[in-house]
Image (tube, rainbow, N blue to C red):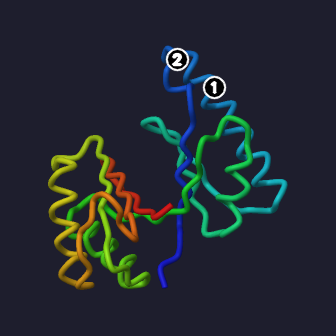
Amino acid sequence: MISQDVVLVRYGEITLKDSWTRNSWERILAGNIAFYLQKAGVEYKAERGEGRIFVFTSDPRASEIISRVFGVVSASPAFSVPSHLEEISRAAVALAEEARPESFAIRPRRSGVSFSSEQIGRVVGEAVRVATNSRVDLDRPEMEIFVEARRERSFLFTQ
């Protein structure tokens, strides 16, 4: 079974602000997240970057706690792998093999990597299709695998 090692935190209108204001509000939001995680006794390490807050923890309660913090739009339990197509493919296959969907879609996003979102979708999708014998359905898939590829690490999640 694959277990989360990070929670991807997405927030709303902060990203629309100028860089000084955005930085200030991100720090405040990260502080609020830290307050509630510490209050619940969750061990974690947080990083801010590229319009996200990454909360590294294996505690399954973290995403639920974070999702209730004011300013958080969503908090997705995820796991991280090095930003190489082979590693991303292996991780996506492991996720899909666990769920065994009849159909799936890869939902890639990227920033600071040498490959395109289209390449991620094509390469990772083919690996999942071959390994699970599931069909690709981009309109109404039974399972969606989200991939956020960043410079150093890529993050995969299903919710």
Q: Closer to the N terminus: mark 1 or mark 2?
A: 2
Q: Nearer the viewer, residue 67 or 137?
A: 137
The image shows residue 13, relative to residue 45, as above or below, that is above
Q: Position of residue 50 (x, y in %)?
A: 42, 36
**Residue 12 relative to residue 120: left or right:** right
Spatial separation of the CA atoms under disc 1 and disc 2: 9 Å
How many C-alpha atoms fall within 10 Å of the one at disc 2: few (<14), some, or many (≥20)?
few
* Callout 2: SS: loop
Asked if the residues shown at circle 1 and circle 2 are in contact, with their CB atoms under 8 angstroms apart, the answer is yes
At a point 73% along the width and 37% down the height, the residue shown is: 70
Q: Position of residue 104 (x, y in %)?
A: 32, 69
**Residue 93 relative to residue 70: left or right:** left
| Residue type for callout 1 | Trp
At a point 36% along the width and 78% down the height, the residue shown is: 96
Q: Position of residue 67 (x, y in %)?
A: 68, 50
At a point 30% along the width and 77% down the height, the residue shown is: 93
